[in-house]
Amino acid sequence: MENILTINNLTKKFGSLTAVDNLSFSIEKGNVYGILGPNGSGKSTTLGIVLNVVNKTAGDFKWFDGNIDTHNALKKVGAIIERPNFYPYMTAVQNLQLVCKIKEVSEEKISEKLELVGLLDRKDSKFSTFSLGMKQRLAIASALLNDPEILILDEPTNGLDPQGIHQIREIIKTIASQGTTILLASHLLDEVEKVCTHVVILRKGVSLYSGSVDGMVASHGFLTMQSNNMDLLQNALEGNSAFGTIKREGEYLIVYLNQPMDASEVNKLLFEKGITLSHLVKRKESLEEQFLELTKQN
Amino acid sequence: MLRLLNIELQKLRYNRAAKVISIVYFILITFIALISSIEFNFGDFHFRVADQGIFNFPYIWHFNTYMAAILKLFLAIVIVSMMSNEYSYRTLKQNLIDGLSKREFVLSKFLTVLLFAGISTVFIFLVSLILGLSFSDYNEIGIIFSDLEYIGAYFIKLVAFFSFCLFLGVFVKRSAFALGFLIVWQVIEWLLYGLMKWQLFKDTEIADKISFFFPLNAMANLIKEPLSRLGAIQSAANQLGENFNKDYGVSWLNLLIVLVWTALFIYWSYVILKKRDL
């Protein structure tokens, strides 16, 4: 697999505060990565370092095969961090022309990218007249001008209204479906769950998990059940090794599975023991529950 | 190189404030020509500034570059804000993310400084040439093109001053504060000079020698005031028993000091950007 970005033991200290602590992970071509973490967990600092705006304290990182200067590598990257930054007195097109000059790419893709983010009809409006949603979409258009190997987005839906959030997500999905590698930093879990194949979870600058989303949800799920005779039900379950922790939550019994098992199999098993269920739901833990479990202060 | 200049010009081209100030600056330079039309009439006494020899070659090179250099403050505003805007719009960060290196960033600003100074120098050369050809008493080619060192000194003076402004813009981040700092720095130089001249090294030349190395003072010394060199003032001074034996030329040591400062300002701008987390 071709590595786009490799981070090794990266550390960043701001005075006595360690924002990023010995962080290592790598980004492979073609995947959609999410960097998850509560506010202040070092997401933006990590991105700042690899994007050449924050100086690292220790460790290293390399773009592509490592034979290229960071600033030249960034010409093959599209990135938006925090909020869209453009010259307010220039129009959308003039701003994009400037980015083309910096990235040393031709200006012919400007219209195409503006079309993609739905701003073509506003191309000659000054940036200062744009709404936040439009500014963010312009930033995406700008990041795509060079048809980047990787698109880096830091909190792309921050501060947007529901329509704006929806538009940005649709754009991200479109881009992901075209096979572009994406690195998405966010604290919005549903956002990450919807588009990402891989996640890196950070807390206080330390990586807690790095790998595929499926791998993270390692358990076999859990069942929520209810019956007329709850005690009988609990006894029946406790005698079976297929079931792990059993706990009562209000009127329901929560049972964690130790092995893969269908809800219908469980139902059949219990019916054979003469227990009828009035409620049976099998569920996997959501990314959110996993995330909260992992980042729990301890 | 051309790419970097191109990038910077794209930023300035659409900036209305920068355009207006630059245009005002060049218009003001041409207003030096207006001095020629100043006339006084005291009864029978007829006085016309243009007849006093200020537009004579080669004195005009000295006089015009000295006068025009005062106006450099206008372009300084453009230079400072072109840097501080990058902070306030946070576009410095975006430029770096888009693939400009910090070195290229400083270089693109410095090239713009060179360009501004260059245009201004060509402009003052042409204005002086035209004024001189209209009013000068001497029109021999050899005289016209003598003492052109002032044009060179003017260019270096502008480059150094704008580099200082650029450095202040990088260092202070806010244009108003950076310009304020410029004034404060000038005051500091005066105070230090005064302190040395009348307190620390009384009755010696040490204060003058040290202040010779101060950045703003060195820039100011590059083109010395030309007025006391005027024929009318010289003869008036002679009558009063005063004698000006001043060297009005451009000194090589002075030039070297200014160039060293310029290099330091640009280098420090780079170092600050490199060290700073944006």
Image: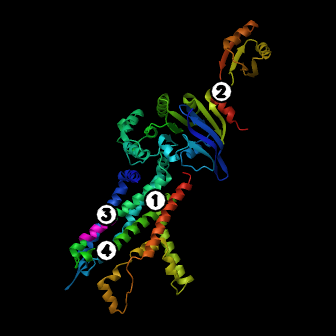
| Residue at the disc numbered 2 | A217
Q: Give the structural element (helix, strand or loop) at label 1.
A: helix
Vertical arrangement, residue A34 with respect to residue B246, above or below: above
Of residues A196 and B154, the one nearer the viewer is: B154
Q: Please name which of the two marks, 1 or 4, marks the residue nearer to the observer.
A: 4
Q: Earlier in the sequence, mark 1 or mark 3?
A: 3
Q: Please name which of the two marks, 1 or 3, marks the residue nearer to the observer.
A: 3
| Residue at the disc numbered 3 | B26
Q: Chain of mark 2?
A: A
Q: Residues within 10 Å of mark 3 (few under 14, many from 20)?
A: some
Q: Give the structural element (helix, strand or loop) at label 3.
A: helix
Q: Please name which of the two marks, 1 or 2, marks the residue nearer to the observer.
A: 2
Q: How far apart, in angstroms, are the residues tagged by discs 3 and 2? A: 69 Å
Q: Residues within 10 Å of mark 1 (few under 14, many from 20)?
A: many
Q: Residue at x 49, y 69 (%)?
A: B184
Residue type (three-letter) at the residue carrying disc 2: Val
Vertical arrangement, residue B67 with respect to residue A177, above or below: below
Q: Give the structural element (helix, strand or loop) at label 2.
A: loop
| Residue at the disc numbered 4 | B61
